[in-house]
Image (tube, rainbow, N blue to C red):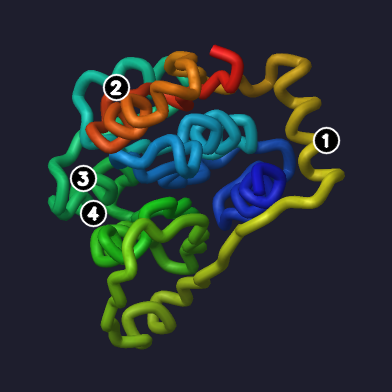
Amino acid sequence: MIQRLSQRLREADDRIVNNERRSSRAVASVNNAYLAAKNPWLQRQLARLAGAYVVALTTSPDKADRIRMLGAHEVIVHGRGEDFSGAVRKATGGQGVDVAVDNVGSQLFEPIRRSLGIGGRWIMIGQLTGQFVPFNPAQLFLKNVSMLSATSTTRKQLEDSLALVARGAIKPIISMALPLEQAARAHTLVEAGKSVGRIVLRPNG
């Protein structure tokens, strides 16, 4: 999945052309209480590594500085259920983003749709609820928006990803390590949006 994400970002309309770096605008992640389910911290680092101008979203003001430290050029702090698309468009000079990586799904369908620019790519890697979303297909095809998905990964992609970690190109973010007996506490922290990155559960205490 990590390699697929990097590939999608490299395919963004604004990219390095004839050795001239142009602005590649991407919403690298959508942050919510379920950070441990899909890892947006790596997405931001990969987006920057791929040459994107990274606009990151978070509902937690306490995490904004850490997100910038991990490579985001812009960090938008928004309330739950708030339409952040206006802030995204402002951050991209009114054009919207080329690539949106969505690990939340239907809850943020409308603001992400409004955040996409002409020819934008919408990469879906998560769905947190069973909610269905009604929409008019013209809202996508009139802007030439592509909806893509990334689910599992190949062994080669996993090896490539581990190689990026080994050479320090990306850094996995571990919030804390807890014994398996404290799994309920870990779930509580994740659901409350208190964890920064992954929470590791140790089976042997």
Nearest to N terminus: mark 2 or mark 1: 2
The disc placed on residue 63 is 2
Give the structural element (helix, strand or loop) at label 1: helix
Q: Nearer the viewer, residue 184 or 83?
A: 184
Give the structural element (helix, strand or loop) at label 2: helix
When the figure is inspected, residue 175 is found, relative to residue 120, above or below; the finding is above
Give the structural element (helix, strand or loop) at label 4: helix
Q: Nearer the viewer, residue 95 or 159?
A: 159
Nearest to N terminus: mark 2 or mark 4: 2
Marks 4 and 1, how far apart in space?
A: 36 Å
Residue 109 location, x and y as percent? Answer: 30, 65
Q: Residues within 10 Å of mark 4 (few under 14, many from 20)?
A: some
Dot 3 and dot 4 residues touching (CB under 8 Å):
yes
Residue type at numbered disc 2: Lys
Q: Residues within 10 Å of mark 1 (few under 14, many from 20)?
A: few
Nearest to N terminus: mark 4 or mark 1: 4
Residue type at numbered disc 1: Glu
Q: Read off the residue under disc 4.
A: 85
Residue type at numbered disc 4: Ser
Q: Read off the residue under disc 3.
A: 87
Q: Read off the residue under disc 1.
A: 159
x 77%, y 17%: residue:
166
Q: Residues within 10 Å of mark 2 (few under 14, many from 20)?
A: some
Dot 2 and dot 1 residues touching (CB under 8 Å):
no
Q: Nearer the viewer, residue 24 or 34?
A: 34
Dot 2 and dot 3 residues touching (CB under 8 Å):
no
x 28%, y 59%: residue:
108
